[in-house]
Image: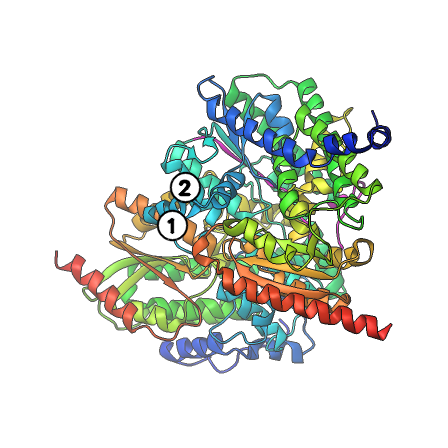
Amino acid sequence: MAVRVMEGWQGLPIEGVIQYCRDLVEDVDYPTVKRWREDGGKVVGHFQVYFPEEIVAAAGMLPLLIRGGSFEARGADAHFGGYLCSIVKTSLELSLTEKVVLDMFVSHPICDSARNLAAVYGRNFDYPCEILYLPQNANSAYAQSYLRGEYDRLKRGVEDVAGRRITDEDLRSAIAIFNENRRLLREMYAIRRDTPWLLAVDEAYALMAVGGMVPREEHNELLRYALDLVGKRDLQPQDRMRLVFEGGFCEQPPLDLLNTIGQSSYIVDDDLLIGLRWITEDVPLEGDPLANLANAYLEHSSYSPVQHDLRKPKEKMLLERIRNSGADAAIITAAKMCEPGLDEQVAYIKALDEEGIPYFVSEFEESMTSFDNLQIQLETFIENLLFV
Amino acid sequence: MSSEQSVNQSASTGHDGADSIVGRGNKEGNRLFREWYKELTTSEERGEKSAYVFVMGSLAELLRSFDLHTVFPEINGLQTAVRHVSESYIADAEDYGYASDVCGYVKADVGLQMRHGEHPMGRIPRPAVAVYTNACNTYIKWAEIWERMYNIPIFTLDVPGTRAEGKQTWRGNEDFENDRLYVEGQLRELINVLEGVTGKRFDIDKLRENMDYANRLSVGFKRVVELNKAVPALYNAVTDGTVYLGVANGFRGRKEGAEYFEDLVEELEYKAANGIGTLHEEKYRLVFVGVPCYPIFRRFGEMFSEWGGEFVGSSYLWFASGGTNTGFEYDLDNPLESLAEGVLITVRDAMDSMFYSDKMLVDMVGPYGIDGVVYHAIKSCRTVSTGLADNRLAVMKDADVGTLLLDSDHMDPRVVSEAQLKNRVDAFFEGLATRKLMAARAS
C-alpha cells in the first residue's frame, strides 16, 4: 500500500470511529485526497453511480467517487441552467474550486445530466474527461462482450494517465481488495437488517461513504475494526418501525437528514451509494479479469432507476428489498430535479399500493439544512401506523 | 430529374415556376403530416400495429419492413403544445402521480394514454412494441411506463456515444468495431422481437428498399441544412425547420419522405438561385440551440423576426433528426451491417449535437455568417439543457458573436413567461445592434 491517508481512527471506540468518518465525509476539502496527492499519487474522479474502480486501483491511482456535497455551487452555477439536480453542480464546483484536483474524470450515461457533465468537465479542464458507456441494454446477449471491450478501452485511457501498464495480475489484486470491501459492506448491511439498533442509518452511511475517498485497503481495515466494535455495542432494541429508504442511488441526502430519520425508525435497508455495493457477489479471480468485471456488472448486481434491465423491474426489486429486510414500510424519496428518481416514484407507489405496504413520499436536496418539517411528517406517518 | 435540371427548368418558367415551387415544402409538409395522423387514427380499425419510437434513432427503415406504423410520442407531445392543450394532458399525468419536474413530453404522453389516444390531430393507436435508443435517457424511463401500462415488449437499442469531445472513432478502429458489433447484435435481436410482435418473417429486400428511401431522404436533408448558408436565408430553421423535421421523422424509410426532400432541395436551390428569402427582412443571422418554445411557438418566432432576426441554423435540426443531417448513406449490399454502422454514426452525432455542440456552432459562424447564437434551455429536458450555459461560455470565448440564453419550457405553458422572454430577446437585439455599429465604426 502507498501512503496512508487515514490516521487517527485506530484505537477509538465505535462512536469515535463513526465521528471520524463523518468528519471526513462532510469535509469538502477532501483531506484524504490531498494526502494522496501530496505523496505523488494520481486521482481519477468518477461520477455516481457505478464505476469499475478496480481498473483505476490496479494502475496504482486513487478512484475518487464524485458525489457532490452539501455546499453552495457558486462557481458552477454559471455553467448550468436552473432546472437541474444539485449534485451535478456541486460536483463541478469541487473541481472548479480545486477542493479536489483530478488527473482524469469519468461520467456515465446514468442520466442526461450526468452525460452532459463529462462534456462540461471537458470544456473546463485539460485532463481527460470522458463518458464510460455502461450498457443500457443489459438483456442483450452482446452486452457482456461489448462491456468487456469498453472496459479495455477505459483501461488503455487509465494507463495513459497513470503512465504505466496494467497487467491481469494488477487487476486480480485490485479485484480481491474490492471483493473484500463489498463483503464487509454486505456484513454491515446484515447488521442493519438483523440488529438495526446496533447501527443507525447515518452511522452506517458514514462508515460506508468514506470508502469512496480513500484507498480501499484502508477502508477494509477500518470496516473490519468498526464492525467488530459494532457487534459488541451494548444497545437494546427499541419499539421502532422498520423502514426501507429508497431514492439515494445518486445525489446523497445530508447526513443530518439520515440522522433525523434514524431517530424515529430503523432503516433496515437502503439504496444509498448503491454503486459501492452494486456487485453483489465476489468477482472471480481466475480467468479474464475484465470479462469477470463485465459479467459481474450485468449478472451479479443490484438495481437502480438508472440501469435498465428487463429482469429487474424496479418496483419488483423494491418489494423484494422490503421483504428481504423484513421492513414494515418504505420511505420513497428522490432528489429534486432527478428525472429517473421521480419517474420511478410513480411505479414504486403503485406497486406499494397494490401490496398494501405503507410508504412515505418525499424529495430532498443535498444542500438542505432544515429537517424539522420532515421529522414532524415522518413521526406523524409512523405514529399513524404504530397506533392503528 | 436531378435537382439542377429541375431548377433550370423551373427558373425558365418565370413567375409561374416560382409560384409552383416557392412555399411548396411547407404546404406539402403540412399535407403529409395530416395524412400521417389520418393513417394512425384508422390503423387499429384495419388491424395494423404500431411501434412507439423516438426521433433519435427511430429505426423506421426496419420497423416499416414489418409493416409497423411509427408513432412518435415527442411529436404528439409538441403538437398538443402548439395547439395550446398540453397543459390539460400534463395535468392528468400529474394527478396520476408524476412530479412537476418530470419531462413535459412524458407527462403529455401519459395524459394521452389515459385518454385512450385522444389527440388534437386524431387518435393515437396503442403500441404493439416500443423501440428506442439511449440517445435520451428519458426514452428508457418512458418506455418502461408503456411496458407497465400495456405489458408490451420494449427494446432498448443501446448506442454508445462519443466518449469525449473530438474523440469519435470510425470504421477500422477497434473501439468503433466494439460499438458497431454491439449495435449489430442488438439489431439482430430486435428483428427476432419484431417477428414475434408482427407474426411476419423478416424481409431483407423490404428493408433494403426502405433504406434506399432513407438514403435519399438523408442526402436531401443534409443539403437542406447546407443550403441555408445562402443570403438571405431560404428558410427559418426553427419555424420552417420544424415542418421539415416532421417529415424527416414521420416519413423516414418511405417513398414520400424521399421525394419530399428531393422536391424541397429543388425548391431551396431555386430560391437560392433567384435570391428569394423568407417573408421577413433579414438583419441578423442567428443559430438556435435547444428545443423550440412550442406553447407560444408562433409568438416565440415573432419575437426574433420582428427585429429582423432569422434563424439560419439550429441544433434542433441536427439532434431531432436523429443525425440525419450527417447525410449518412447505407450500403445496400450489406443492409444489416450498414444499418448498424449508420445507426451508430447518426445517433452518436445526434447526441454530440446536444453534448458537444460548441465547436459545431463556432464552425458555423463563418460559413453561415452568424451574428448571434440563441440558447433555449427548457425545464423539461436535461438532455438538451444541462450543458447549454457552459456551451455558451465556450462559444463566447471562441467566436465573435452575440449570445442569448433563455429559460422556459417546450411543453408546459406554466413555465413560459412571454413577457420575460421578450424582455431578454429585445435586450439581445439591442446588443446585436450595438455590436454591428461598433464593428462598422472599427472598420
Q: Amino acid at mark 1?
A: Tyr
Q: Is residue A105 left or right of residue B277?
A: left
Tell whether position B166 is magenta: yes
Q: Earlier in the sequence, mark 2 or mark 1?
A: 1
Looking at the image, which is closer to me, B355 or B368?
B368
Residue B225 visible in rendering:
yes
Label 2 Cα crowd, 10 Å radius (few <14 / some 14-19 / many 20+): many
Q: Main secondary structure of the magenta part?
A: loop
Residue at which label 1 appears? B98
Which residue shows up at 35% across the image and 48% down it? A348
* Closer to the camera in the image, A234 or B194: B194
2 and 1 marks in contact (CB < 8 Å): yes
Q: CA distance from mark 2 to mark 1?
A: 9 Å
The x and y percentages for residue B5 are 86, 28
Q: Label 2 sits on what residue type?
A: Val
State the extent of the magenta-drawn residues as a range: B152-175
Can you give x and y, in whole percent of width and height, for residue A288 in the image? 65, 46
Residue A229 drawn above or below residue A340: below
Relative side of B102 to B238, left or right: left
Q: Residue at x 77, y 34 (%)?
A: B18
Which residue corresponds to mark 2?
B110
Chain at numbered mark 2:
B
